[in-house]
Amino acid sequence: MRRIWPDPADLDETGLAAAYAQAPGVRVNFVASVDGAATLAGRSGGLGNPADQRVMGVLREAADVVLVGAGTVRAEGYDFVRPHMAIVSRTLDLDPDEFAEATVITVSSAPAERRSRFRDVVLAGDVDVDGAQAVRALQERGLGRILCEGGPHLLGTLEAAGVVDEFCLTLSPTLAGPGATRVTAGAPTTPQGMRLAHALTDDEMLFLRYERIIS
Ligand SMILES: NC(=O)c1ccc[n+]([C@@H]2O[C@H](COP(=O)([O-])OP(=O)(O)OC[C@H]3O[C@@H](n4cnc5c(N)ncnc54)[C@H](OP(=O)(O)O)[C@@H]3O)[C@@H](O)[C@H]2O)c1
């Protein structure tokens, strides 16, 4: 892994972990093709490679909780992520055995019978989960370093709430062509400026880390 900006240097495991040390807040991690697609054939996996998997592992190590939308859990076939996982869902169409220990963030209109299948259920809205309420609930559980691994509708929710502090984007050297979704989806939100914190490269991948501009 090589850092190309700032301070060019080769990074070993320790250097990579230091580059991704996480402060309390919401960090988001996505992979996209160079023409802006979030998926190939409906999944992000086709855009990734071992270098991307390595960075994903480092990001998870740095976090207290991995936060994902239920659409991503289903599309990508997620297992429970240790040390902790939080899943945002309206329908609660989730495997209650696999995700028994997860924090499930849902809405008051979610089916009561399905709610009762999970140990830790947060109600963070009536019809839509509110991003700020979801983040507060995790912070109250001592899970202050939040890593959101998507997907697009959950990112749209977090952007709408103005709670995205960091954005890690892996740029995959792929032209996906038209049709795939972007990394964000949902209702329009107010654009937010970000500053580039670092650019790394390995195995043709570009790893960009952006931070919220504190004004
Ligand atoms: N490129 C990448 O890095 C990347 C990362 C992640 C995912 N993806 C891809 O993105 C696609 C999935 O997209 P997606 O937008 O459907 O993913 P998503 O945001 O993970 O899932 C959407 C689902 O999450 C729940 N949800 C999200 N926001 C909610 C809110 N504000 N209130 C209530 N529920 C909410 C709902 O679950 P229920 O349906 O259970 O109610 C909703 O249907 C897949 O193809 C996946 O492979 C790509």
Image (cartoon, rainbow, N blue to C red):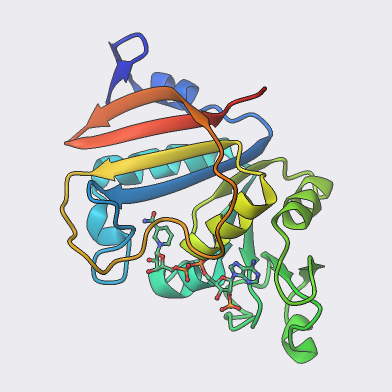
Please tell me whether residue 178 is drawn above or below residue 207 in the rendered image.
below
Q: Quadrant of the rendered structure where residue 129 is? A: bottom right
| Residue at the (77%, 72%) spot, across then down | 119
The percent coordinates of residue 39 (x first, y second) are 30, 62
**Quarter-wise, where is residue 120 in the image?**
bottom right
Q: Residue at x 33, y 42 (%)?
A: 170
Residue 134 lies, in percent from the top left, at 74, 57
Q: Report whether 31 appears left or right of 188.
A: left
Residue 175 placed where, x, y %? 15, 53
Let me know if residue 83 appears in the view: no
Residue 165 lies left or right of residue 177; in this view the side is right
* The quadrant where residue 43 appears: bottom left
Left or right: 203 as drawn, with respect to 67: left
Q: Going 38% across and 38% down the picture, which residue do you hit?
A: 55
Q: Nearer the viewer, residue 73 or 158?
A: 158
Q: Which x, y percent locates residue 152?
A: 47, 61
The relative height of residue 20 versus residue 101 in the rendered view (above or below) is above
